[in-house]
Amino acid sequence: MAATARLTMLKAMGGADIAASLDRHVGWGLRQVDLKDAIFGKGVLDLDDAEIVRLRAMLDQRQLTVATMSTVLFHPPIERGQEAFRADELGRIGRAMEIAQALQPRCVRLLAAQTEAREQVLDTTPYLRARHPWVFAMYREAIGRLSEAGFRVLIENEVGRCIWSRPEEVLGFFEELGGGSAASFMWDVQNLWQMGTFPSLPVYRQLRPIIGQVHLKGGIAERPGGPLKWRSSLQDASWPVEPILREIIADGASAVLCLNPSHGQAPDGYDQARVTERDIAFLRGAFPEIE
C-alpha cells in the first residue's frame, strides 16, 4: 500500500480565537490540530481543569482530534542548572500527562534545550556529556514517564541558542539517550536552517532514522543556500520542498506533516491566513498521498 501522510497546523495559525480557529481547521478540511498556545489566551500547559473540559468539548463538536500537544518544556538554557530544570521542566511532566490524558494527543512534544555556550561549542554532545551530563538523564525520565502513559514523545529543534545546529548534534544527542529511547525527532526544517544547516536531501537522509514528525515552513534565502531573510509560502521557498517531501512521504517518515508560520521579514502585503490556505492547496495538489 502506498505511503500516506495527514496534514495539520499549529492551532494559532487559525487565529487567536479558539472557536474561530477550530472552525477554520474544519473549513480547510483539516481533521487534526496541533495544540500549543493561543488557547483561551494561554499555553496548553497553563489551562485549568475547566478549560480542558471546555476545549475537549469544542474538539469533539467538530470531530477534531489532537495530532500533537506541543509543550514548551525543556526549552530554557541548560546553564540554569540541574535543580532548576528538575523543578521547572521535569516538575511539570505530571501536569502534562494529566492534560494529555484528557485531550488524547497522538504525540507530546518537548523542546531541545538552549545553551549559553552555543557560540563557543561546535558539537554540543561532548559538551553536555562533560559539563551537564544530567541533561540526558532528565530527558530520559520525562520520555519514560510520557511513553509509559501511552504517548509518543517528540523532541523539536528550536532557534536562538538551541543545542542542535547540525544533524551530527541531533544524532549524537539521540545516540546518547540510548537505542531504547521512546522519543523521536521532530524536524523543524526552517529552524535548523536558521541555526546554520540549509535544508537538503542529504540532510534529510542523515536525520531519517530518528525522524518522527516534520514541521514545514517556507522561507526565502538572502542568497542561494544562504541564511533565511523573508517569510514565504512553501511554493515560493528557497529550500527544495517537493523533493524532500516526496522522500519523507515515500519513506513513511512523518505520518503527520505540520504547517508552521514562516520566520523571516514579512514582505509588503504578506497575509498569514492567505499563505496558509495557499500552502494547504499546494501540498494537496503536489502530493495526492496527503489525506
Image (cartoon, grey):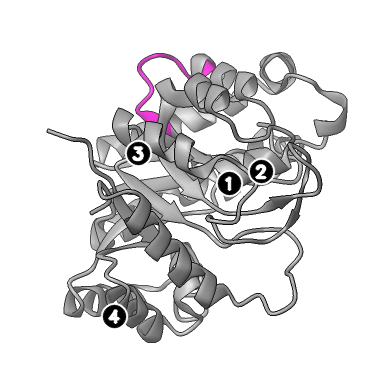
Cα–Cα span, label 4 and label 3: 30 Å
Q: Are marks 4 and 2 in contact (CB under 8 Å)?
A: no
- Relative image position of residue 246 (x, y in whole percent): 38, 37
Q: Quadrant of residue 30?
A: bottom left
According to the picture, the residue beneath numbered tag 1 turns out to be: 87
* Label 1 neighbour load within 10 Å: few <14, some 14-19, many 20+: few
Q: Residue at x 39, y 86 (%)?
A: 20
Which residue is labeled 4 in the image? Answer: 54
Q: Position of residue 241 (x, y in %)?
A: 51, 44
Query: Circle 4 sits in a helix, a strand or a loop, which is it?
Result: helix
User: Of callouts 4 and 2, which one flags the residue occurring earlier in the amino acid sequence?
Assistant: 4
Amino acid on which the number 3 mark rests in the picture? Ser
Q: Nearer the viewer, residue 5 or 241?
A: 241
Q: Is residue 39 visible?
A: yes
Q: Decide which of tag 1 and tag 4 comes sooner along the chain.
A: 4
Of the image marks 4 and 3, the number of the one nearer the N terminus = 4
Q: Callout 3: helix, strand or loop?
A: loop
The residue at which mark 2 appears reads as 84
Image position, residue 259 (x, y; %): 46, 57
Mark closer to the observer (4, 3):
3
**Disc 4 from disc 2: Cα separation:** 32 Å
Foreground of the two, 128 or 282? 282
Question: Marks 2 and 1, how far apart in space?
Answer: 5 Å
Amino acid at circle 4: Arg
Q: For the magenta stretch, what is the residue range?
A: 176-184
Question: Residue 254, labelled with which disc?
Answer: 3
First in sequence: mark 2 vs mark 3: 2
Are discs 2 and 1 less than 8 Å apart at CB? yes
At label 2, counting other C-alpha atoms closer than 10 Å, the crowd grade (few under 14, some 14-19, many 20 or more) is some
